[in-house]
Amino acid sequence: QVQLVESGGGLVQAGGSLRLSCAASGTIFTFDSMGWYRQAPGKQRELVASITSRGITEYADSVKDRFTISSDNAKRTVLLQMSSLEPEDTAVYYCNGAKWGAVYWGRGTQVTVSS
């Protein structure tokens, strides 16, 4: 059974940095793409950043130039380096991976940015 486990969330002051990590287990395949989504209270889940197995990245406009996504296909991990954090970045961050039309989700990690 494929599992994705996030780590690295926490409480940080505005302007600070955090690095989120996601590791996949229970599989030997490389995901076609992996990404990070977030969901703030009362809002829909939204894409933060994604990266394909070939290294093509996509970012939400709100995080461009502040967040960087990277992955290690062999280790089946994806990282999200977040800098210049703003209170608006407060949310539960979810890792996801896609392969053969199936999408897998982690349980999420809370990121709270205080003003």
Image (spheres, rainbow, N blue to C red):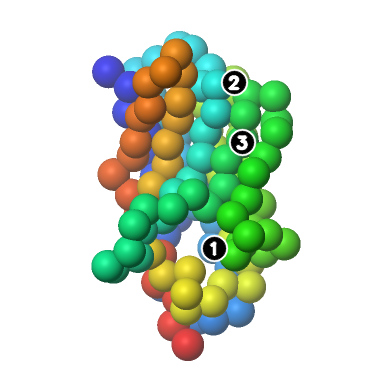
Residue 10 drawn at (x, y percent): 40, 66
Closer to us: 115 or 25: 115
92 w.r.t. 114: above or below: above
The amino acid beneath tag 2 is Ala
The amino acid beneath tag 1 is Leu
Residue named by callout 2 = 74
Q: CA distance from mark 2 to mark 1?
A: 24 Å
Residue named by callout 1 = 18
Residue placed at 42% from the left, 42% from the top? 95
Q: Secondary structure at mark 3?
A: strand
Label whose residue precedes the other's in the sequence (3 or 1): 1
Binning the other alpha carbons within 10 Å of mark 3 as few (below 14), some (14 to 19) or many (20 upward) gives many
Determine the image quadrant of residue 40.
Answer: bottom left
Residue placed at 41% from the left, 70% from the top? 90
- Residue 80 visible in the picture: no
Label whose residue precedes the other's in the sequence (2 or 1): 1
Residue named by callout 3 = 51
Q: Secondary structure at mark 2?
A: loop
Q: Which mark is residue 54?
A: none
> Looking at this rendering, what residue extends furthest in the bottom direction?
115
Q: CA distance from mark 2 to mark 3?
A: 14 Å
Residue placed at 43% from the left, 53% from the top? 46
Q: Nearer the viewer, mark 2 or mark 3?
A: 3
- Residue 79 visible in the picture: yes
